Amino acid sequence: MSIHVEGTIERKGFGMGTWALVSSKETYELHKAPADLQKAGLKVKVSGQIREDVMTIAMIGPVLEVASFEVVN
């Protein structure tokens, strides 16, 4: 399922750590987050796919594979 989400990037300390997108409604675990997106506190708009075929150790929310993103102020 393709989605568009606006939120803040956070580093979650589960296992070896994972990057997450925290929106007002949901927390998404980022799947293979691009290096430019791996900055805690970054406010972004992200477009991507929910990956229901991917399991993770952190299990903090739906797994989101990023197709594109833009930084917002």
Image: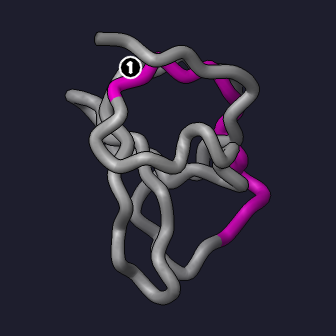
Could you say which is closer to the camera, residue 68 or residue 61? 68
Could you say which is closer to the camera, residue 21 or residue 60? 21
In the rendered structure, which segment of residues is drawn in magenta?
A: 43-55
Q: Secondary structure at mark 1?
A: strand
Q: Which residue is mark 1?
A: 6
| Horizontal and vertical percent position of residue 1 | 70, 27
Q: Quadrant of residue 64?
A: top right
Could you say which is closer to the camera, residue 32 or residue 27? 32
Instruction: Report the side of 35 relative to 60 (left or right).
Output: right
Instruction: Report the side of 31 relative to 13 (left or right).
Output: right
Task: Please determine whether, in this image, residue 35 is positioned above or below residue 72.
Answer: below
Magenta residue check for 46: yes
Principal secondary structure, stretch drawn in magenta:
strand
> Would you say residue 62 is visible in this rendering?
no
Task: Please determine whether, in this image, residue 2 is positioned above or below residue 34.
Answer: above
Count of numbered circles on the image: 1
| Horizontal and vertical percent position of residue 28 | 45, 46
Picture residue at 54% right of the left edge, 15% below the top: 70
